[in-house]
């Protein structure tokens, strides 16, 4: 079978290379899935650059997010049958409840665990969820990390935002756009930031009325306060990290929540805790979500007929171009690699 591997000792966006690998066989309690599409997350770029996941095995198969169809069952499998359309889960052993450290080591496409960027992949039968009927493989492959993360940040922390509450999303990557779509479906007001006039027009087309160009307004938290009449937002979907967190702490209302998800602006910068203490604000890290969270998300996507926003779809032979597209930072929505 064909698979993409990260070459030994490679540490940048040219690390991916197409290779031939033996086709796997499912064992007891396992399912063989023909992968039809996979999507890229920012962590996959960090892995390629050697900045995420610790010690990386030689010739690691990357990516955690995939959609495909069941082609063979191991002994004892009852949950699935051949032909079922399924999705991978980001933490295969996290069924429900709070996150536990032991789940981290099971994430595919990082460390010692091969991922899903291969024509055939074996999964434990309870490491999969059913793909929503209204989405094709390309769209469905975007859900396991970004969409579940957005769902968890919005709806699985206290207080759960009520209709009319205000959510700030940063940029136009996968998590931010999923958060905007889910928030609007729940009757929340969305404010979005971007540095591109073209992307702002696309945000308006998605129904996001309030946008801020952070190049024109580098102190963009002041615009957030203006749009909320000085009150601030109820929730911030914080994907920037150290470079944007100080302004997020100013943009959120007293008693509001900053859901810390991404590190796009880097790590290591000191953060002044005073705004957290004085307002008071809750800052919480979001670690994707459980399989039950994924199932709850899928019910909402189907009920509201929400479709993921795709930036570009690449064939498997151009997988490294897909990674370069992410590295360039010009995407709007999710980047997908098609394997059929």
Image (cartoon, rainbow, N blue to C red):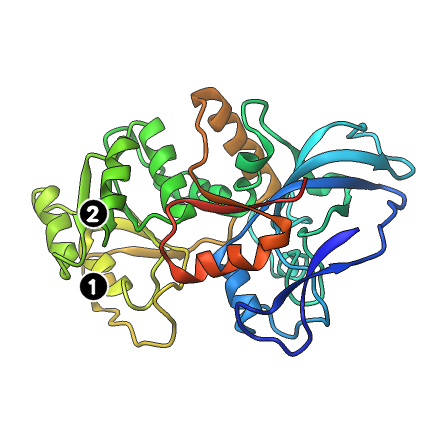
Above or below residue 311? Residue 21 is below
Residue extending farthest to the front is: 317
Location of residue 274 (image quadrant): bottom left
Which residue appears at 66% of the width and 64% of the height? 17
| Image marks 1 and 2: residues in contact by CB distance under 8 Å | no
Position of residue 313 measured from the top left corner of the image (x, y, whole percent): 52, 43
Instruction: Describe residue 266's horizontal placement relative to residue 316 as left or right.
Output: left
Above or below residue 293? Residue 271 is below
Position of residue 241 measured from the top left corner of the image (x, y, whole percent): 35, 64
Secondary structure beneath label 2: helix
Position of residue 222 measured from the top left corner of the image (x, y, whole percent): 11, 55
For marks 1 and 2, the one nearer the N-term is 2
Between 311 and 172, which is closer to the camera in this rendering? 311
Secondary structure beneath label 1: helix
Position of residue 327 measured from the top left corner of the image (x, y, whole percent): 44, 62
Location of residue 59 (image quadrant): bottom right
Between 65 and 29, which is closer to the camera in this rendering? 65
Location of mark 2 (residue):
197
Instruction: Describe residue 279's horizontal placement relative to residue 52 as left or right.
Output: left
Which residue appears at 77% of the width and 34% of the height? 70
Above or below residue 230? Residue 14 is below
Instruction: Describe residue 220's horizontal placement relative to residue 311 as left or right.
Output: left
| Residue 289 in view in this figure | no
Calculate the distance from the C-alpha at mark 1 to the C-alpha at mark 2: 31 Å
| Residue 74 in view in this figure | yes
Looking at the rendered structure, which numbered label has been put on residue 275?
1
């Amino acid at each position: 079978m064909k698979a993409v591997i990260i070459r030994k000792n490679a540490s940048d966006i040219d690390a991916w290379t197409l290779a031939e690998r033996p086709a796997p066989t499912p064992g007891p309690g396992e399912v063989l899935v023909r992968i039809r599409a996979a999507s890229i997350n920012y962590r996959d770029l960090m892995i390629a650059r050697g900045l995420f996941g610790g010690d990386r095995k030689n010739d690691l198969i990357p990516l955690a997010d995939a959609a495909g169809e069941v082609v063979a069952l191991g002994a004892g499998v009852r949950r699935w049958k051949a032909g079922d359309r399924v999705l991978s889960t980001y933490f295969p052993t996290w069924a429900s409840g709070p996150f536990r450290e032991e789940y981290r080591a099971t994430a595919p496409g990082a460390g010692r665990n091969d991922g899903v960027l291969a024509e055939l992949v074996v999964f434990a039968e309870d490491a999969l969820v059913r793909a929503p009927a209204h989405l094709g493989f390309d769209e469905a492959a975007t859900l396991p990390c970004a969409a579940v993360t957005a769902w968890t940040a919005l709806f699985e922390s206290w207080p759960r935002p009520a209709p009319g509450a205000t959510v700030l999303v940063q940029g136009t990557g996968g998590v931010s756009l999923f958060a905007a779509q889910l928030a609007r479906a729940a009757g929340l007001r969305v404010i979005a930031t971007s540095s591109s006039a073209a992307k702002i027009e696309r945000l308006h087309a998605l129904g996001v009325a309030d946008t801020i160009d952070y190049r024109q307004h580098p102190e963009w938290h002041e615009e957030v306060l203006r749009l909320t009449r000085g009150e601030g937002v109820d929730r911030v979907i914080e994907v920037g990290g150290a470079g944007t967190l100080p302004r997020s702490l100013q943009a959120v209302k007293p008693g509001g929540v900053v859901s810390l998800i991404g590190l796009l602006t880097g790590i290591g910068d000191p953060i002044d805790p005073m705004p957290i203490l004085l307002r008071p604000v809750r800052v919480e890290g979001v670690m994707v979500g459980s399989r039950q969270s994924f199932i709850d998300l899928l019910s909402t996507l189907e009920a509201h007929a929400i479709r993921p926003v795709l930036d570009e779809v690449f064939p498997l032979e151009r997988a490294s171009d897909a990674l370069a597209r992410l590295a360039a930072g010009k995407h709007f929505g999710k980047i997908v690699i098609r394997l059929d």
